Image (cartoon, rainbow, N blue to C red):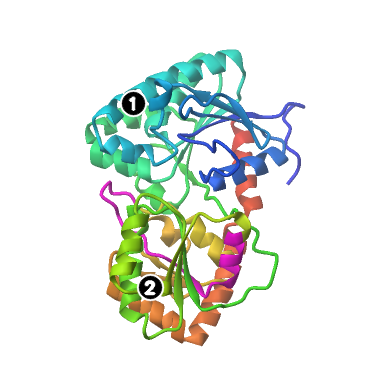
Amino acid sequence: MEYCEVEDKKIKVLFVTTAFPRHRDDVITPWMIELIERLMKYGIDISVFTSSYMGLKNQIYNGIPVFRFRYFFKKYERLTHEETAVDRFSRGGFNVLLSLFYIISGMIAIARLLRARKFDIVHINWPFPHILFGIMAKAVSRCKIFATFYGLEIRWLKKKFPSFIKSFSWLINRADVITAISNHTASELKGIVKKGITIIPFSITVDAQSGAVTDENFILFVGRHVERKGVNVLIEAFRKIHTEIPHNLVIVGDGPERKKWEKMSQDYGLGERVKFTGWVSKEDLHNYYKTCSFFVLPAIYDKHGDTEGLGVVMIEAMSYSKPVIASNVGGITDVVINGHNGILVKDNDSQELARAIKELACDKELYRRLSFNAKKDIDERFNWDKIVSKLIELYEANH
């Protein structure tokens, strides 16, 4: 890919996102950081527009200018970061008021920013409700609007705000370019988006190239401990077959469901066979991927109707030549081809998941074939250079 310049001027892009890392150890959207840093290496001038957190001001994060807008009194600015804004909003009460202030304050702040600074493109992530920020940006400047869907926002719109669908459709079709991270997410936009949707996924945030890959007899899950990850189904499945296989279960991550899952594991008498690590360093995560037997992503539809939009941790595991077992839901089906590079199972079915785990643990030929195809497919289909090149081509075409 060549260094990107248009008429000797860098393309200036403003990424709009709900939340962004507050410090270097903050575990928020690591794939977005990876994408932004790669775009910057190829000459795209990126800034980020996002919400404040308890009064946090503008900052520079890894060389990326981050513009944060305030939306309420300092001690109450916790709508984002610690958990999703959707989860906060769904609890109602004061969180609904905070959400209203978030939208109004964001619209005012982005208008001020674009009057003060020139951006060629405003790239909206999670367009419901952020398309309102994009419309405001376009009203005060001559920027182009990109909108990227991840899945949660459109399912939330359909389930919680069906009366807004017609208005949202009118707003989103004002965007110049619309992308989605998976074919599944694009299909959910049918009837709402009137123009073509470009599929641009994201890829891995760890380096799978260093060190020998081994098999140390443990099954791995990585992710935020929230309902839609379905780890309760995984623990239930492991309970059914743990005496029949030598593998342990390692669960990496943290979140609101962790205590419940830990208690579930204890109540089942699984003891040291199940290990909860919390969040780990990038180096430790690399070692877990490198030494696990295989990866399981038991995603389900949660109470908001949300599920996996793509499953980047699953893609990361596959990049280490690790086969995966995953639920046949959401964007997972864009990645896993059943019987070719992994095994797809019915969601929320611990019996079927247990059978798949036992099969993969015991069938060495199946394991070998899935491992080989997993690595090959990720290298070919989820290559960062291809992803970044495709996005830059869209930026250049709409600059």
Q: In this view, does 117 lie to the left or right of 190?
A: right
Q: Check residue 271 in the rendering and tell me which mark sits there, or answer none.
A: 2
Q: Answer with the quarter of the image where residue 11 lies.
A: top right
Q: Which of 318 and 242 is in front in this view?
A: 242
- Region in magenta: 284-306
Q: What element carries label 1?
A: helix
Pointer 1: residues within 10 angstroms few (<14), some, or many (20+)? many
Relative to 230, is 124 above or below?
Answer: above
Q: Answer with the quarter of the image where residue 249 lies.
A: bottom left
Residue type at the position of mark 1: Leu
Q: Is mark 2 on a helix, strand or loop?
A: helix
List x then y, in percent, for residue 28.
51, 43
The residues bearing labels 2 and 1 have C-alpha atoms spaced at a distance of: 42 Å
List x then y, in percent, for residue 210.
70, 65
Please check the rendered image and state whether residue 189 is part of the magenta-colored stretch, yes or no: no
List x then y, in percent, for residue 224.
43, 52
Residue type at the position of mark 2: Gly
Q: Nearer the viewer, residue 347 or 55?
A: 55
The answer, for residue 230, to whether it is visible in the render is yes
Q: In this view, does 389 lie to the left or right of 71?
A: right
Q: Report which residue position mark 1 lands on.
A: 98
Q: Nearer the viewer, residue 386 or 276?
A: 276
Please check the rendered image and state whether residue 297 is part of the magenta-colored stretch, yes or no: yes
